[in-house]
Amino acid sequence: MKQRSRPCAQDDAQVVVLSDSKQAVTCLHTGFTEGSPDPAHRALLFPESGSLLERLLPHAGRVDVRWLKGHIGHELNETADTLATLALRRATGRIAERTARRAIDDAGRKLPNAPTVTAA
């Protein structure tokens, strides 16, 4: 069964991607312009960046990628930083899996009008 690539619940909804990485924003803009995930593979932003760009490409016309200055108190950026820190601490064994899952669930509940964030 082929998995359908859909970044959000509504097929025609506008998708806004916020990043505090100028490199990531440039990479996504280049990928949308070229119509290829290759810029993400070349930039090596993170291991899944190429597959993420591949999933977004069919929806490029309704994806708005914006740079957001980090560490200024923007709720979504702060939550992303919290989740990244938890992932790193979990990957390096500095936090127990159960504690990490609880913290991830707590961070997800704080997001306004967002789907539930669950630990993988």
Image (cartoon, rainbow, N blue to C red):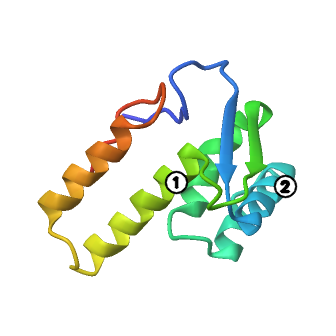
On the image, the x and y values in percent for residue 26 come to 81, 62
- Dividing the picture into quadrants, the one containing residue 111 is top left
The residue lying toward the viewer, choosing from 55 and 78, is 78
- Residue count near mark 2 (Cα–Cα under 10 Å), binned few <14, some 14–19, many ≥20: few
In this rendering, the answer to whether 106 lies above or below 31 is above
Is residue 81 visible from the viewing direction of this image?
Answer: yes
The residue lying toward the viewer, choosing from 97 and 76, is 76
Q: State which mark lies toward you, 2 or 1.
A: 1
Question: Which residue is farthest front?
Answer: 73
Q: Earlier in the sequence, mark 2 or mark 1?
A: 2
Identify the element where label 1 is drawn.
helix
Residue at point 13% right, 58% down? Answer: 98
On the image, the x and y values in percent for residue 35 come to 79, 50
- What is the quadrant of the N terminus in the image? top left
On the image, the x and y values in percent for residue 85 come to 40, 68
Q: In the drawing, what numbered circle is on residue 59?
A: none
Residue pointed to by mark 2? 34
- Dividing the picture into quadrants, the one containing residue 19 is bottom right
Identify the element where label 2 is drawn.
helix
On the image, the x and y values in percent for residue 13 come to 65, 21
Residue at point 61% right, 47% down? Answer: 74
Give the residue type that dot 1 points to.
Glu
In this rendering, the answer to whether 95 lies above or below 3 is below
Is residue 120 visible from the viewing direction of this image?
Answer: no
Residue pointed to by mark 1? 78
In the rendered structure, the answer to whether residue 91 lies left or right of residue 15 reads: left
Residue at point 67% right, 48% down? Answer: 18
In the rendered structure, the answer to whether residue 109 lies left or right of residue 70 reads: left
